[in-house]
Amino acid sequence: MSHSSPVAGPPSSDASRVVDVRTLAHLIRLSNQSGTLLLMLPTLWSLLLAAQGRPAWSLVAIFVAGSFLMRSAGVVLNDLADRSYDRQVVRTRSRPLASGALGVPAAWLTAMALMTAAAGLLVFLNQLTILLSPVAFLLAAVYPYSKRVLAAPQAVLGAAFGWGAVMAWAAARNSLDAPVWLLYAGTACWAVAYDTIYALQDRDDDARIGVKSSAILFGRWTWLAVGVSLGGMVVCLGLSGWMAGLGPMFYLALAAIGGFLTWQVHRLRSHLSPEQAFAMFKQHVGVGVAVLAAIWLGFV
């Protein structure tokens, strides 16, 4: 299509504005909120467990909004750090920064705006939660660069995604009790597992360009590493629920979840296409919802 003539100035300006909005939506992965849900669900587990099944709706709203803002900021920071790598990977070369559809200053401005909005939510929370918040921002900033240094950067992602559960517990109880640390460990194990599955999509490209991941580190033993991580998740969640006094329905539901996760591990023993790996990764949103339901059932 040829460029518009000068006479068509106003329509062209409107079109550019629409393209900019779409580019920003693409930048923060607005059409794919799996990451937001995976960050949000452990905070809801924590709120439900800390409040004995009756969390304050105001806290639920704050952590839902905070999860969206922090995940959005996180993917922008990730793209800023990885833009040169993303150009070399088929799956990521169309991202706005990698493709040149968006400039670096605009991306930094977007990330800062999102993190400022997330920080603004802290005014509605207690002092303990505010004191814990710098760790969340630090982990979000460090994770994109850990892929250059650590053989399993998924561990940093796990630490980051689990920290929301710690903050949620502090917001609900104004204390940090033993069950939340087990919940944190379980969430971290879960994130290592599902992000390793996610990394299977790009294992060959990552190895070629020098990006580190647990999928590369463990190679043909990836199924075992994921199995150990998911086993750690189930054990930590079970112990956290036991310390919080959950009833037998929680353990029955957790056993069913464990059965599904065992099937996933078995599936990993055979070759997966990138599409199959991504589909398996997305199933973990359902796993997170099932854990939330299990905790609720434990209070019934």
Image (tube, rainbow, N blue to C red):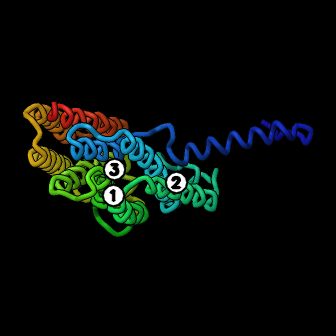
Q: Name the amino acid type tagged 1.
A: Ala
Q: Residues within 10 Å of mark 1 (few under 14, many from 20)?
A: many
Residue 294 rendering spot, x and y as whole percentages: 18, 34
Rendering quarter of residue 214: bottom left
What's the residue at 64%, 43% (across, down)?
A: 21
Quickly name the residue at label 1: 160
Give above or below for 117 relative to 262.
Answer: below
Label 2, label 3: how many angstroms apart (C-alpha)? 30 Å
For marks 1 and 2, give the one nearer the viewer: 2
For marks 2 and 3, give the one nearer the viewer: 2
What's the residue at 52%, 60% (across, down)?
A: 80
Residue 199's tag is 3
Q: Name the amino acid type tagged 2.
A: Ala
Q: Secondary structure at mark 3?
A: helix
Residue 89 rendering spot, x and y as whole percentages: 47, 51
Residue 255 rendering spot, x and y as whole percentages: 10, 35
Label 1, label 2: how many angstroms apart (C-alpha)? 18 Å
Q: Secondary structure at mark 2?
A: helix
Q: Secondary structure at mark 1?
A: helix
Q: Earlier in the sequence, mark 2 or mark 3?
A: 2
Give above or below for 153 relative to 50.
Answer: below
Q: Earlier in the sequence, mark 1 or mark 2?
A: 2
Rendering quarter of residue 292: top left
Can the viewer see residue 216?
no
Classify the position of the C terminus by image quarter: top left
Quickly name the residue at label 2: 117
Classify the position of the N terminus by image quarter: top right
